[in-house]
Image (cartoon, rainbow, N blue to C red):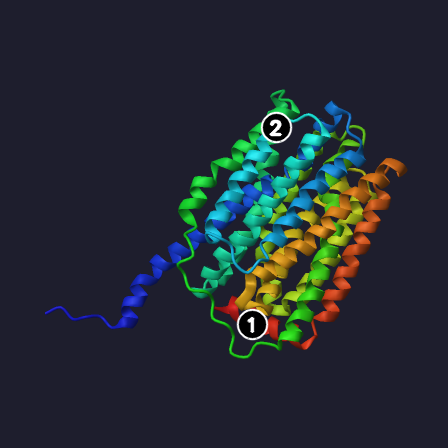
């Protein structure tokens, strides 16, 4: 006679299927961020030098195009802060992926600032949809199934997209492709992942993560989230100078042109494991202390990119930028999620908006300074100063009661 297995044994049998499902979910999130962020946001950096050379763009104009993307990112982040989205999160998430890919390809059809600016604005808005909604969809389920550690795989998608798009741009340039073809190919690469993401990331049928039994007071949460958003805004300003102009920095050094895309591949490769490393540090030291430490290290890289124009400075800047910027993003989202579990999409959106404000200002100021000083030292030092300020605020805020409570929950979630 067959004996019925106890419920615990049945759960053990089904656990591998759940783990495979969570791995697929994290893979879907990784592909989504590779498309919308790694390609959609950052492929502009390796395409910028040949595009600027062909069109005669000044650094100020290049900075304006970058800032248009970040302004769209801000608009998308603010839109995602509304309490309810008609139709649910997943349709907006998938629409963001599609719009991002289309606007990339459309850049190859444009040829002037009046066309570039709205296209990059729409692309930035789409990338915010994917980051905020994709992170909420993926992180909700991973936390609910005690697999929050797979969040690092989700955020690693940005580095994957940067590396793959840099290799694509490099291969096409070696084949003699012009800047328009680079945009067309990037759009195609971003679009290819859409059906895979639609298959791997399901809808909103999974219950939300339970609210902790003893949340910090509402006023403490609001104040702490405001400080965290300020840090993220300073971080956005500080990193974006190097993120926008790193390849142009390399091109400005005689004889360094063959290294342009290699440097950008280094950024992507360094970004892939960075979320795992900084997540590990965050679990042991607290998300905010790790956030501050990463900002300090990134400040060194941003400074090196400006004051050491040779190969060594560029490699150091690429390694430290890639090794920190997505780690900082993931740590910021972890801290925001701990402060507002019941309204995490809104907290993610506020963080995204603050980040975008810093990014909007960064390229415009940097481009203006580069055109007037004919060098990258001044904007790099200003960017490094912003990162140092973010580090100081994060480290000082780590001892605040509400954030300390959040830190405890971050460690508990990750330990699960």
Please identify the quarter of the rendering in which residue 246 is found.
top right
**Extreme residue in the right direction:** 373
Disc number placed over residue 226 in the picture, else none: none
Kindly tell me whether residue 293 is visible in this rendering. no
* Spatial CA span between label 2 and label 1: 44 Å
- Residue 146: horizontal and vertical position, in percent? 45, 66
Give the SS element for disc 1.
helix
Q: Locate residue 399 relative to residue 11 in the image: left or right.
A: right
Relative to 8, residue 248 above or below: above
- Residue 313: horizontal and vertical position, in percent? 78, 43
Q: Mark 2 points at which residue?
A: 182
- Residue 116: horizontal and vertical position, in percent? 68, 32
Kindly tell me whether residue 305 is visible in this rendering. yes
**Extreme residue in the top direction:** 176
- Within-10-Å neighbours for mark 2: few <14, some 14–19, many 20+: many
Relative to 292, residue 169 above or below: above
Q: Nearer the viewer, residue 283 or 189?
A: 189
Quadrant (top left/top right/bottom left/bottom right) for the N terminus? bottom left
Q: Locate residue 26 relative to residue 244 in the image: left or right.
A: left
Q: Are marks 2 and 1 in contact (CB under 8 Å)?
A: no
Q: Which residue is drawn at 70% across and 74% down?
A: 399
Q: Name the residue under label 1.
A: 409
Q: Residue at x 56, y 52 (%)?
A: 155
Please identify the quarter of the rendering in which residue 392 is found.
bottom right
- Within-10-Å neighbours for mark 1: few <14, some 14–19, many 20+: many
Which of the two discs, 2 and 1, labels the residue nearer the N terminus?
2
């Amino acid at each position: 006679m067959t004996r019925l297995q106890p419920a615990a044994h049945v759960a053990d049998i089904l656990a591998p299927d759940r783990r495979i499902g969570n791995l697929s979910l994290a893979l879907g999130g990784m592909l989504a961020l590779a498309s919308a962020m790694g390609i959609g946001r950052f492929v502009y950096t390796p395409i910028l030098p040949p595009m600027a050379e062909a069109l005669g763009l000044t650094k100020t104009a290049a900075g304006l195009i970058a800032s248009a993307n970040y302004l769209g990112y801000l608009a998308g982040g603010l839109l995602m802060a509304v309490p309810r989205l008609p139709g649910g999160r997943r349709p907006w998430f998938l629409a963001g992926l599609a719009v991002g890919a289309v606007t990339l390809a459309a850049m190859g059809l444009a040829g002037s600032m009046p066309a570039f600016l709205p296209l990059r604005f729409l692309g930035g808005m789409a990338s915010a949809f994917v980051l905020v909604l994709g992170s909420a969809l993926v992180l909700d389920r991973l936390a609910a199934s005690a697999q929050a550690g797979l969040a690092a795989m989700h955020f690693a998608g940005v580095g994957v997209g940067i590396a793959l798009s840099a290799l694509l741009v490099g291969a096409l340039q070696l084949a003699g492709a012009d800047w328009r073809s680079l945009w067309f190919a990037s759009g195609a690469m971003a679009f290819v992942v859409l059906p895979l993401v639609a298959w791997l990331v399901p809808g909103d049928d999974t219950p939300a993560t339970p609210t902790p039994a003893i949340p910090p007071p509402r006023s403490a949460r609001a104040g702490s989230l405001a400080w965290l958003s300020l840090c993220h805004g300073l971080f956005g300003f500080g990193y974006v100078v190097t993120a926008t102009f790193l390849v142009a920095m390399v091109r400005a050094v005689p004889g360094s042109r063959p290294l342009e895309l290699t440097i950008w591949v280094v950024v992507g490769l360094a970004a892939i494991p960075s979320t795992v490393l900084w997540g590990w540090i965050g679990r042991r030291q607290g998300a905010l202390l790790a956030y501050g430490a990463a900002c300090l290290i990134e400040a060194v890289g941003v400074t090196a990119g400006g004051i050491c124009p040779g190969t060594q400075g560029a490699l150091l800047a690429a390694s430290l930028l890639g090794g920190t910027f997505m780690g900082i993003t993931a740590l910021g989202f972890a801290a925001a999620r701990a402060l507002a579990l019941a309204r995490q999409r809104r907290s993610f959106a506020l963080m995204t908006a603050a980040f975008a404000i810093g990014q909007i200002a960064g390229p415009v100021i940097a481009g203006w300074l580069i055109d007037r000083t004919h060098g990258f030292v001044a904007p790099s030092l200003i960017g490094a100063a912003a990162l140092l300020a973010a580090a100081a605020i994060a480290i000082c805020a780590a001892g605040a009661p509400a954030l300390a409570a959040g830190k405890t929950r971050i460690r508990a979630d990750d330990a699960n």
